[in-house]
Amino acid sequence: MMQGSSYSMRDTFGKLLAELGEKNKDIVVITADVGDSTRAMYFREKFPDRYFNVGISEQDMINFAAGLSAVGFKPLIVNFSMFVMRAWEQIRNSVARMNLDVKILVTHAGYSDSGDGSSHQSLEDIALMRVLPNMKVIVPADPDDIKRSLPVVIQELRGPLYYRMGREYSPSITTGVDYDFKLGKAYVLRDGDDVAIMGAGVVLWDALKAAEELEKIGISAAVINLFSIKPIDEDTIEYYARKTGRVVTIEEHSIYGGIGSAVAEVLAKRYPTKMRFIGATTFGRSARSQRDLLDYYGINYKSVISAALELVK
Amino acid sequence: MEKGGSDGTPISLEELNKLKSIAERARRNVIRMLFYDQTIHVGSSLSSIEILTTLFFRYLREGKDPINRDWLILSKGHAAPALYAVLAEKGYISEDELWKIQDISGLLQGHPEIFIPGVDMATGSLGQGLSFGIGVAQGIKMKGGTGRVFVIMGDGEQDEGEIWEAMTHAVTRKLDNLVAFIEMNGFQLDDSTSNVKPKDFLPDVWKAVGWKTLSCDGHDFVSIINTIDEALKVKAPVVIFAKTMRGKGFPVIENSKRQRSSPDDARKFLLNA
């Protein structure tokens, strides 16, 4: 199956992190014994004095970062998505409640830790994070989206942020597309009139593939990259709901409380629209690749096509 | 040195009497808060009065520069009424605010929030203060500041896993600008600490992982002061096990698991005291 050029989310992230460390001396990186796996090691190699491995202690990691933030540092927590969730209450009660400038940058989200199975797969994190006051939630689609958005969110945004990435699998989605990241703004990857496919992350590759296939049978599909999940671009969501009258959401996350839910919340108040939700409904399982899992659970272009056809008929 | 921070100098009788009268007013004000809200945690608050009074009136160096001032983190956030009563003595908040504690129109929340003047960390969920204190202490050292960090925890709070995470972390960082208190009042919410999870072994554990452990009588100013003075000389993180009494000075709940009391009991106490 054609997946475009493949390049690593975490490697792109780690190298960029080290570059950002050059530009801002207040940046400190904190991890809980996953510096190599997350590629925070690139930062460690350049700035050992500003790199902290707190050991396998996620709760301590969050409040340690909160304390560093309170005296003027810019702490970046780098960890697996799943294990940061272990300290959700610390994130809520310390970081979000005090509105501290702590950035939580996670890898291994969704099914991306395919082999390790359900204990390591994070399918609930967007729901948990977007419910928190003060917290912003960003989900880049591919390494190019990371390059666009990470410097902006680290250098320019103050306050708590959850930034969600996968591991290796990263089909090209936004390569060569000329746009800038702006918090709260969606980006239209493809215009269309009959159905709008909205989502974020690597599954946008499936959204684009589905749109290509739909075009062959005369259905015009728009594809919207909602990489700013919170705040979310209500205007663009409403515009495409009005334009097409049909919305399909796709996410590598539970359909309960995730990206589809966020879109539905917008449309329920601004323009109630027929929708279909594609995403996870169960815990995952082990597999040899992330792609196998996406296909196994039907979070792929075939499901998008089926959902679009169901809405269009 | 900023205002405050008279550590090291022997305490005069005059200062001792001053601390005693401040603590007594704070104690009475905590009990008086029962007239306005019966759900406040009186027992835990009364066990913290002398430690808070000592820190605020003898040690904490104030200032706007976050790295050249001292920090006070009330990790046992349910003792907020005691903190507020001492903050009122210090002039951070007006005494009138005390009577609006937990009222929707009031400033003072049931647990500390950072929008309250004099509060350094929003707490209330147990086990989180020490990790935050480690972050502050580490940041101060990295920036070459002189600030010190004091964290007050409860004995029941020691059940939390994050305490273990933080305890071992502070030693790794060699933080000699960090002083933690563990108040040993012998009770947690449901029962005595010995019935829920024994705590007697705690000093051995803290010592074993590398903390300098000291102990004091948490209601005796001289004992508290001598111990803090000793702690501040140690080139390692220090934990002070402070023997305290839940409900200290308020006989109807003293040394019991009772956290709360009635306005009637408060009135009788204040009239007779």
Image: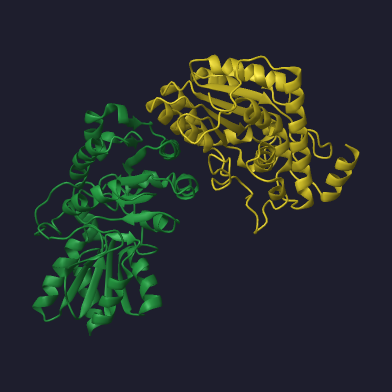
Chain colours: A green, B yellow
Residue A8 seen in the current view: yes
Instruction: Identify the image quadrant of residue A50.
Output: top left
Residue A235 point in image, percent of width and height: 30, 72
Q: How many marks?
A: 0
Left or right: residue B8 compared with residue A198:
right
The residue positioned 37% from the left and 72% from the top of the image is: A266
Q: Nearer the viewer, residue A180 or A120?
A: A180
For this rendering, which residue is in front, B55 or A249?
B55
| Up-down relation of residue A97 to residue A308 (above or below) | above
**Observer able to see residue B198:** no
Figure check: B219 above or below B94: above
Drawn side of residue A144 relative to residue B33, left or right: left
Q: Nearer the viewer, residue B19 or A44?
A: B19
* Towards the viewer: B250 or A208: B250
Residue at the farthest bottom position: A313
- Of the 4 image quadrants, the one containing the C terminus of chain B is top right
Residue A157: x percent and y percent? 33, 51
Q: Quadrant of residue B140?
A: top left
Image side of residue A89 versus residue A215, left or right? right
**Percent x, y for residue A230?**
35, 60
Residue A23 percent coordinates (x, y) = 23, 38
Vertical placement of residue B257 versus B230, above or below: below
Residue B244, placed above or below residue B160: above
- Determine which quarter of the picture holds residue A219: bottom left
Residue under the image location 35 percent in, 51 percent down? A162
Horizontal side of A303 relative to A64 (left or right) equals left
